[in-house]
Amino acid sequence: MPARIPFWNIEAAWVFYLLAALALALFGLGLALNLARWRPGFAWGGFRAARLKAVLADALLGRRIWRGDVAAGLMHALILLGFLGLFLGTCLVALDHYLVSFLQGRLYLATSALWEVCGLALTIGLAWALVRRYLLRVPRLERRPADALLPAWLLAIALSGFLVEAARIAASGADWERWSFLGWGLSGLFGPASAPAAHAVLWWVHAGLSLGLIAWLPYSRLFHALAAPVNLYFQDEPQALADLSLPPDQVREFSHRHFLALDACTRCGRCVEACPSARAGEPLAPRGFVQDARRYTRLKYSLLARIPWLRQRQRQELSTRPTIDPAQAWYCTTCAACAEVCPVQAGPIELIRQVRSSLVEQGSTVPPLLAQSLERLAKYQNPWLAKKGQKAAWAKGLDLPDLAKGDQAGLLYFVGCTTSLDTRAQGLAKGLSAVLEHCGVEFGTLGKAEPCCGDIARRVGENGLFEEQREDLSGLLADIGVREVVTSSPHCHRSLSHDYALARVRDGLAGPLPFRARHYSQVLAELVDQGRLVFPDGLAVKATFHDPCYLARHTGEVRAPRRVLGAIPGLELVEMADHGRNGLCCGGGGGRMWHELPGQGHLARARLEQAVATGASLVVTACPLCLIMLEDARKAGGFEDRLAVRDLNEVVCLALGLEGGANPF
Amino acid sequence: MEILVLAKQVPETAEADLEITRDGADVEREDLVYTINEWDNYAVEEAVRLKEEHGGAVTVLTLGDEEAEDVLRRGLAMGCDQAIHLNDEAFLGSDPATVVRAMVKALGGRRFDLILCGVQSADQGQGQTGVLLAQALGLPYASLAVGLKLVEGGLVITRELEANTLEEVALPLPALVTVQSGLNQPRYVSIMGIRKVRGMAIEGHDAEGLDLAGQVGPEAACLAARRLSLPETGAGAEILSGSLEAVCARAAGIIREKGGLK
């Protein structure tokens, strides 16, 4: 009857068991070392079906790997499913051999055929991986010695597996072995006389390579196979805010979520292609940063360092080996392009923020201009050089209700520091006020009492300052009893909705935030949907929309601004090469609006090049920072004759004829 | 190395629209933000750097009211080890000689290898406290330091003189050095950093405890502010007004006229 005879033709099986024990011991040690890093702060938090679904879709089916790169998705699927099939097959054989015998007859033949398919998939997938990396030379892939070793090793396992099978078939010659169709085809390579000896040699090679892989796995990049699913499972777990209740010396540099993400990274390099900073030739490369952090934290938080003599070595290595380059951390615009494309949700925004926190606390390497802006924020509640009274100066003559002074209105317009204080960005505030008034929406502001929401402090890692600003604003909003907030800036919006909610959870407060914060584009889109914002005349112009990162990616809102633009008759909307959730950052986020860095690139200029390529004459955006960055680039980069840059509100005002004058485009 | 550094709390005036009080003796302080005197900030940074490099301890001292404690907390957050607060509203309005007398009493014979302070304060700008303290303690001193090097047997100080001249002087320790701005790049002090030192003890002294009751403050001062006034707009200055575009166009025109743009 067709069946597998384990250890057929193999002498001294005890050697195999010895090697297997060794491999498992090394595997166990590696696993323990990794889990030890994950453990502090780790909370299971109960089973959630939605999380499991995300793991199945993103890990097993590789949804995020297929996205944007079908060739990579197919390669990964072939390798993963081939590998998993063969791994399960080996488990079945072990089960059959050691516990219950069931792999016989037709069942055995069917599974044999299936293993052939899996082996073939694995082989094709690995060959394809090597072709992509070394022949097609896909730019985002690295070509270091270790990058060849892992796929080559796996390929050697697959090929030696087929050869062992072929030699076995050549030696035993049973007719039902045809079901192992590849082995059957290859069996002609071996003569009946030499087959048994060749089989024994190949068997040991195959076994050695396989056990070697098991031993190596937790130390290699293949560990992502275990870490990535775990990271995907916890992807929606809030990244911890600074725990203010802990004594300062117990606050950890990194949390388990950072370690999980570091271990999940496969160095695929999609983040490098997406990162606006890296694209502009700046020194930050997200992948490199992650890998440096991974090396550094693996060394620094190693379980082995508890052994005294290894501790000595660890200290020595920490002091001599290059670690994270902290200067790189300041280049990140926190635009989340890396997170958007990362197949394993390991984009390093939070890691970078954490590194920034350490730098801010240490103090001496904070870029001087940024330090100045933060000091101003602490003193004057805005990062610009302005005293508090000036925050309401833009609204002089508008006679808006001042909720901080007891006036009543259903909607609070949170203007934000940049929009109230920067002369260019004030156009946004004036525009929105005019539009809301036109639509009959009652709203008020906080006048000159409006504090900063704390966004800049949070993005650059000044956690204490963020908390101060948040407490001030939350207190003020609670005192007034605000329920509805509309913001100028997607940054304030993100802060007020997401970061304030996280802080609420951290502080153990029950229930959602007492107010709902929306970005103004969402309010305008609602007014369009309700038929309250209509455009009788329209505006003839070919326009393109620059998605603010904090609106499109951080908040996931790409529809609202397009809904508003789409409602304007005569306005033709064309899209840039990178748009929506894949929009390209203007370079103003993450605190970069407030400082200059050595070797700083022209991020906004690269964006305007894309806008020019669409043939549009107008770039519309919906964020004060984008507005300033793009406007500056327009002037400095020689785009003045080709493009106009406007805030969405300004365009709406023009289309409504609230501005007066002719179509300027 | 034991270092003492003096730090004063001053109102931030660089960006403020200063208004004179009705009696003309002071500026309106209501809307002003208080912070560490810029020059003293460089002194604190230098003291902490010296400690980080050569070991020892840094004590930071201020004289002022309750609020002035912020300056000490800031100093502790930057890396100072101890803080002394001459904390009494009665001290406000004292002249430099009185301030120094109070400091000497509060120090009570404690010895330091080096005393650092700003060359002057941003509010009064008399530039006397440092040198008077050196005199009172019988220490050699150097003023206007833009460079400070610890060498065998003492210090080498680079002083900033007039017309871009630098002077290098050697001082034996113990000594006092007053610090010019730009000596270093002071570190950023985070809110968390300040929170961390919230619990550290601060040594406090009031006028009575120092046997100085009645001998400090404006009454005991050898000079009194009679009247403050804002500088008058000179004839050489032209204040542009009008819309932003008009102002910019005019400014660009002037720059071009004067040969600033070729």
Image: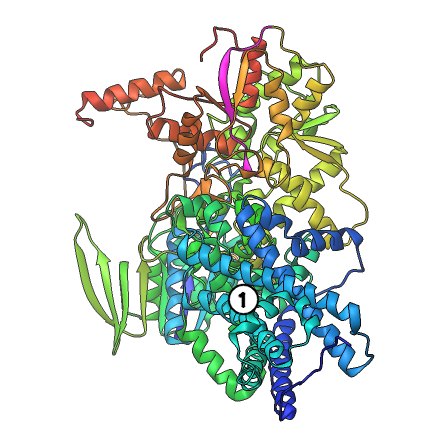
Q: Is residue B195 visible?
A: no
Q: Is residue A537 visible?
A: yes
Residue position marked by numbered label 1 in the rendering? A221
- Dot 1 alpha-carbon crowd within 10 angstroms: few under 14, some 14 to 19, many 20 or more: some
Instruction: Let me know if residue A543 is in the magenta part.
Output: yes
Asked whether B146 or A20 is in front, the reply is A20
Q: Chain of mark 1?
A: A
**Where residue A555 sits: x, y (%)?**
64, 39
Q: Assign the N terminus of chain A to one quadrant of the image.
A: bottom right
* Image-quadrant location for residue A96: bottom right
- Measuring 34% from the left and 47% from the top, which residue is drawn there? A599
**Where residue A310 sits: x, y (%)?**
51, 85
Asked whether B256 or A655 is in front, the reply is A655
**Where residue B39 sits: x, y (%)?**
37, 53
Q: Assign the C terminus of chain A to one quadrant of the image.
A: top left
What segment carries the magenta color?
Answer: A537-549
- Measuring 36% from the left and 74% from the top, which residue is drawn there? B113
Which amino acid type corresponds to the residue marked 1 in the rendered image?
Arg
- Measuring 75% from the left and 41% from the top, which residue is drawn there? A513
Provide the secondary structure element on which disc 1 rests: helix
Asked whether A349 or A606 is in front, the reply is A606
Residue A188 appears left or right of A498 = left
**Up-down: is A269 above or below A493?**
below
**Up-down: is A30 above or below A426?**
below
